[in-house]
């Protein structure tokens, strides 16, 4: 009796499937395996909580960021966590939980503003510098290297003093902090985009566009820019975490936003320094924990996306997770052919 024939299983075409499988985050989740997938999921959860908290701050916060009293009277300074104030109150009499929640909105506004300005300026300068070259390229490279070599926090402090005189209201303070961070980030985007443009402008499809008479603006916009910005999402996530730390550093050193204009985690940490020696732990623990969790979440997302963008790491980790039978390897020790 002949053995039953089994039909070969054909793999589905790589490019087919539901459209939502090809969405940016969904595609990376499907590619990730093992510990890498766990890191990406943890990072997305922490980043998602931060985003939801920032967007719904007026709904989630029990009090305003500068509120000192309610219908029952003043909150009182340095009150321990209780039913009325779940995370206690600060030395200034503010509700800690409300300050932490409202601080997420301030951080979110600074991140969005700083990264948007940095991308526009850095990508534009990198595109022009890499495409045209010449003396303009040399001048921009020297300027970018000089700024990049300067201590980032010190540069942000100088820019904050120049822009706002040290402290200001919400929108002026957000703009000042964002511009301070933008000066730090522009050289990073500039260098990445410039190096990609220098490589891409020598490709055959760019030369073909020149031969058929396409203008420089069309070549830069339709051919070069599209291929030179593929790695920007990776840099964006890592820069977002750096923006949080820079903003917190400015507030901690006293160059942040006025407490009556907005809540800011670095400022709250600065005011809680004297509380730590007195055994009052809640005024510093929760703002510090918020900074750590947000930076951790954004960093995990950025590092995971960076690994997934490297085909060598992605292929190696996928192979490590593939069962031996899927590779066509017979591990039966009684099989003499396999032993030989």
Image (cartoon, rainbow, N blue to C red):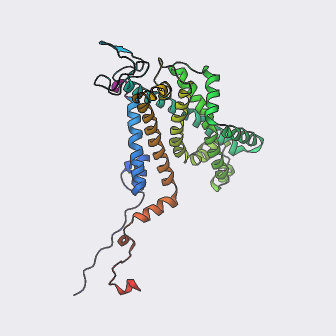
Viewed as shown, does residue 186 lie left or right of 308? right
Please tell me whether residue 197 is drawn above or below residue 265 in the rendered image.
Answer: below
Tell me the quarter of the image containing the N terminus: bottom left
Instruction: Work out whether residue 32 can be spotted.
Output: no
Residue 105 horizontal/vertical position (percent): 44, 28
**Looking at this view, is 210 or 183 the one in front?**
183
Q: Does the magenta stretch include residue 59?
A: yes
Residue furthest to the front: 278
Tally of numbered tags: 0
Q: Where is residue 53 in the image (x, y as percent from the top left)?
A: 38, 31
Q: Residue 76 is drawn in which quadrant?
A: top left
Residue 8 is one of the magenta-drawn residues: no
Is the residue 258 above or below the residue 47 in the image? Answer: above
Q: In this view, does 338 lie above or below 239?
A: below
- Tell me the residue at 39%/63% (across/down): 321
Residue situated furthest right in the rendering: 135
Task: Pick the residue in front: 76 or 300.
Answer: 76
What residue span does the magenta drawing correspond to?
56-61
Residue 244 screen position, x and y as percent: 51, 34
Split into 4 quadrants, where in the image is the C terminus?
A: bottom left
> Seen in the image, is 216 located left or right of residue 173?
right
Q: Can residue 85 be seen in this view?
A: yes
At 38% across and 74% down in the image, what residue appears? 328
Q: Of residues 251 and 202, which is closer to you in this image? A: 251
Q: How far across and down, in percent of the image, does residue 266 sit?
A: 50, 29
Residue farthest left in this picture: 1
């Amino acid at each position: 009796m002949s053995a039953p024939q089994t039909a070969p299983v054909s793999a589905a075409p790589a490019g087919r499937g539901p459209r939502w499988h090809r969405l940016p985050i969904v595609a990376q989740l499907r590619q990730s395996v093992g510990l890498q997938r766990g890191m990406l999921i943890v990072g997305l959860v922490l980043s998602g909580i931060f985003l939801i908290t920032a967007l719904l701050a007026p709904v989630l916060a029990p009090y305003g960021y500068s509120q000192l009293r309610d219908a029952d009277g003043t909150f009182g300074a340095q009150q321990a966590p209780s039913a009325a104030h779940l995370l206690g109150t600060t030395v200034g009499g503010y509700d800690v939980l409300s300050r932490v929640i409202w601080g997420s909105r301030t951080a979110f506004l600074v991140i969005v503003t700083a990264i948007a300005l940095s991308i526009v300026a850095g990508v534009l300068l990198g595109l022009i510098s890499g495409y045209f070259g010449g003396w303009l390229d040399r001048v921009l490279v020297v300027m970018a290297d000089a700024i990049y070599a300067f201590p980032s926090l010190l540069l942000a402090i100088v820019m904050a003093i120049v822009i706002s005189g040290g402290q200001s209201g919400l929108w002026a303070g957000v703009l000042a902090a964002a511009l301070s961070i933008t000066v730090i980030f522009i050289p990073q985007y500039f260098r990445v985009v410039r190096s990609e443009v220098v490589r891409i402008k020598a490709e055959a499809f760019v030369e073909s566009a020149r031969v058929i008479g396409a203008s420089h603006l069309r070549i830069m916009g339709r051919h070069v820019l599209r291929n030179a910005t593929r790695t920007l999402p990776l840099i964006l996530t890592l820069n977002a975490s750096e923006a949080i730390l820079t903003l917190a550093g400015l507030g901690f050193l006293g160059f942040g936003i006025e407490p009556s204009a907005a809540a800011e985690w670095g400022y709250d940490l600065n005011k809680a320094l004297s509380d730590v020696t007195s055994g009052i732990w809640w005024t510093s623990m929760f703002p510090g924990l918020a900074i750590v969790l947000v930076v951790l979440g954004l960093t995990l997302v950025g590092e995971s996306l960076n690994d997934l963008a490297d085909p060598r790491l992605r292929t190696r980790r996928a192979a490590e997770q593939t069962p031996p039978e899927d590779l066509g390897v017979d591990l039966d020790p009684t099989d003499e052919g396999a032993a030989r």
